[in-house]
Amino acid sequence: MIDYYKVLGVLPDSSADEIRRRYRELISYYHPDINSDPSAGARTQEITEAYSVLSDSEKRAAYNRRLFGGGFSRERRYQSGQERYGQTNNSNAKQSNYGDYVDPEKPASEGLFDKFLKIIGMLAVLWILLRRPTIVVGILLTLLLLYILWRIFQEIFWLLNGKK
């Protein structure tokens, strides 16, 4: 049996909005008119089939009963998550390695709480830095140096691996 959750790269308790968003991302990437890969047509059909089952609540419930053998529960997901979706107890929940169709260069989406914490952290750092202007100059020069080094290493990596 095909694991439609793995095809779309979502967890079994994902909302309909998450499934729809992921479907649109994958279709826009694997559509045969856009992607020149010969297997893109087959992948598009597989993605569309998975979405047609998971987007309909009745079909999804029946699929979950077949897939999980007697119903879906959070407890069962966490018990079988390690072997089915590659998640361990200490892994980051935002990892995007749940399926074959996950684009590794695309960052996982953040939750609202994570964005809020980042904003608070940035405001705290800005408040500290604005109180000490000499520290700001030192930090900016350090960041500039790190950025230049990063770009150099990135170019070397791309030259060695033939990517860009």
Image: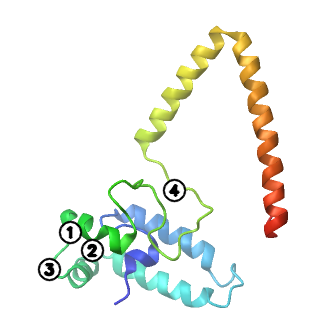
Residue marked by disc 4: 108
Residue 38 position by quadrant: bottom right
Estimate how packed mark 4 is, as few (under 14), some (14 to 19) or many (20 or more) residues with alpha carbons within 10 Å. some
Which amino acid, by three-letter code, is at mark 2? Ser
Q: Give the label on residue 57, or none.
A: 2
Q: What kind of element bears circle 2?
A: helix
Residue marked by disc 1: 76
Question: Distance between the Cα atoms at labels 3 and 2?
Answer: 17 Å
Between circles 4 and 1, the one closer to the viewer is 1
First reached walking from the N terminus: tag 2 or tag 4: 2
Estimate how packed mark 1 is, as few (under 14), some (14 to 19) or many (20 or more) residues with alpha carbons within 10 Å. few
The image shows a total of numbered marks equal to 4
Which amino acid, by three-letter code, is at mark 3? Gly
Q: Give the label on residue 70, or none.
A: 3
Question: Distance between the Cα atoms at labels 4 and 1?
Answer: 24 Å
* Above or below for 111 versus 140: below
Q: What kind of element bears circle 1?
A: helix
Which amino acid, by three-letter code, is at mark 1? Arg
Left or right: residue 119 compared with residue 164:
left
Between circles 2 and 4, the one closer to the viewer is 4
